[in-house]
């Protein structure tokens, strides 16, 4: 049975591919959790939120050499969200927002965000 992240990622991948790549991000090679490119480990990355839901986020990340990937991002009670130097809540994270994510890679390949900065 598919996990929630796999279902969320598969739906996002289909939507991005149908649109020919959203927010300037080419369609991903595979959905997160189903053989996608590896997300950065314990690092900081930026991208655009493609899907924001109660199950988590899918952030589209552009790559310097072209192409892109979708990264599953989880939040928890300790995740700090800010915009313009002011603290925000996880509920302020919406599709289309440009973000900087800092966190650690989890066993399932997703990122557990410790901090998310909303850039727009």
Image (cartoon, grey):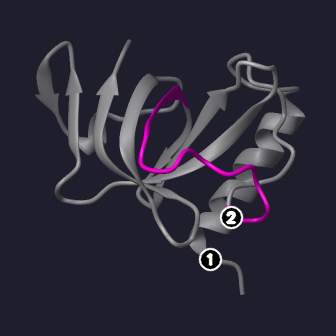
Across and down, in percent, residue 10 comes to 75, 57
Mark 1 touches mark 2? (CB < 8 Å): yes
Whether residue 1 sits left or right of residue 27 in the image: it is left
Across and down, in percent, residue 54 comes to 41, 57
Query: Which part of the image, by quadrant, shows the C terminus?
Result: top left
Secondary structure mainly formed by the magenta segment: loop
Instruction: Locate residue 115: give its quadrant.
Output: top left
* Element assignment for label 2: loop
Q: 54 above or below 118?
A: below
Q: 96 above or below 101?
A: above
In the rendered structure, which disc, 1 or 2, sits on the residue that comes first in sequence? 1
**Label placed on residue 33:** 2
Q: Residue at 88% of width from left, 35% of height from top?
A: 18
Whether residue 113 sits left or right of residue 21 in the image: it is left
Q: Mark 1 points at which residue?
A: 3
**Label placed on residue 50:** none
36 part of magenta stretch:
yes
Span of residues in magenta: 33-48
Query: Which part of the image, by quadrant, shows the N terminus?
Result: bottom right
């Amino acid at each position: 049975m598919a996990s929630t992240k796999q279902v969320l990622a598969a739906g996002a991948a289909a939507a991005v591919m149908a649109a020919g790549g959203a927010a300037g991000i080419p369609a991903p090679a595979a959905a997160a959790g189903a053989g996608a490119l590896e997300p950065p480990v314990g690092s900081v990355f930026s991208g655009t939120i493609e899907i924001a839901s109660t199950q988590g986020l899918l952030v589209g990340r552009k790559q310097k050499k072209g192409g892109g990937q979708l990264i599953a991002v989880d939040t928890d009670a300790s995740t700090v969200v800010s915009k313009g130097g002011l603290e925000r809540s996880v509920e302020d994270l919406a599709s289309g927002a440009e973000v900087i994510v800092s966190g650690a890679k989890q066993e399932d390949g997703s990122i557990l965000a410790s901090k998310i900065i909303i850039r727009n």
